[in-house]
Image (spheres, rainbow, N blue to C red):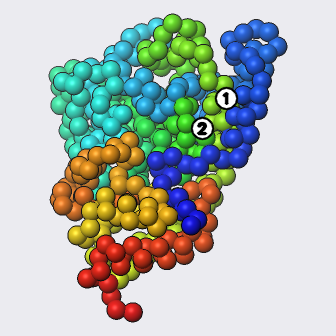
Amino acid sequence: MTRLYLDYNATAPLRPEARDAVVSALSTVGNASSVHAEGRAARGRVEAARRQVAGLVGADAKLVTFTSGGTEANNTVLAPDWRMGSEAHRADMLLVSAVEHVAVLAGGRFPPERVRTIPVDGDGVVRLDSLERLLEELAASEIRPLVSVMLANNETGVIQPVSEVARLAHRAGAIVHTDAVQAAGRMPIDMEALGVDVLTLSAHKIGGPQGAGAIVRASEALTFPPLLVGGGQEKRQRGGTENVAAIAGFGAAADAAAADLAKGPTWADWRTRLAETLRQGGVPVTVFGDNAPRLPQTLCAGLEGVTAETLVIALDLEGVAVSSGSACSSGKVAASHVLAAMGVPDKVAKTAIRISWGWESTESSLDLFANRWGRVLRHVAPGHIRAA
């Protein structure tokens, strides 16, 4: 049976360009901090990747800092003690949206009592009015916050109004971070247009290797305290020998992912068709975030009366890989915190599966999914199937 992989939001298949870059880097020797020819060649690979990653988000290459992944990147920048040039720019409070990835919800280097949550509406879009009230409340107490709102949600695909968040937050003197891990390569990203101070990325979500991520700043003057210290790598922003092979693969994937942006309208059409496929047989289906702007290649939906766990297992047995919520919560059967924040009843939230696709997906995948979905329905909801 040919497997059908529809879990790109968990991790995308490794692109051939990225694989070639990794293999090429692994085939040579050299520490990127060494001054001899081998070291300079390794440094060249790192700097080329830095330019490629910067290009994907419209940033300056010298403001890209490589990490081991999105989680490390988020934990690094969610810190109180930033600097603006030679001046301290302390953030006393962290404000995060209620639908953030757990790597952000955990608060990074802020103590729990210094983390507050910004609510979202029924479609999972951050409440700008609530954010504004929170900012005014903090300003009245002379508390400067750091605001972190993701660009696109990893479970529902809902796109947040980050530029508006940045406008409100900057008016209050806040530093603004956006987790762009799921958005990169799936929607255009222009860091200047977003107006954020810092964003974070992960290689494996765009078809690069696992084990590489990046922090991208908007200004050289604004700096964060390193999370990993003990070396002068990455301009002393992240200690430790660079993972040259993974970084090279990240750069190659970033170049290739930029070309995928032209597929957005086609992917959005596929999302509509997949939602209709889920409704085969007349079983009631809920599409989460349906009224909000969403990534074109993400569909989060639930089948009435059938748990996500049942659907994921049944689809897997039919050769289809999907997720129930975030892959970082693998093994957990509790309802998604994202859907809970949206006000979705627990019983409904526990039906939610996430279907996501990307660079290697083809239109024929839709027909293959439809065929296998029909078989799944006959097993999991036989009493609901509409007569042919």
- 174 relative to 383, above or below: above
Badge 1 is on which residue? 245
Left-right relation of 293 to 231? left
Quadrant of the image occupied by residue 385: bottom left
| Picture mark count | 2
Q: Compare residues 289 and 303 and report the one nearer the observer.
A: 303
Quadrant of the image occupied by residue 27: top right
Left-right relation of 61 to 106? right
Q: Is residue 157 visible?
A: yes
Badge 2 is on which residue? 209
Q: Amino acid at mark 2?
A: Pro
Task: Give me the residue at 80% from left, 9% from top.
Answer: 36
Contact flag, marks 1 and 2 (Cβ < 8 Å) = yes
Q: Secondary structure at mark 2?
A: loop
Q: Compare residues 320 and 69 and report the one nearer the observer.
A: 320
Residue 275: x, y in percent?
41, 71
Q: Amino acid at mark 1?
A: Ala
Task: Give me the residue at 51% from left, 46% from top.
Answer: 11
- State which quarter of the image contains the N terminus: bottom right
Q: Compare residues 211 and 144 and report the one nearer the observer.
A: 211
Q: Compare residues 145 and 248 and report the one nearer the observer.
A: 248
Residue 383: x, y in percent?
25, 82
Q: Residues within 10 Å of mark 1 (few under 14, many from 20)?
A: many
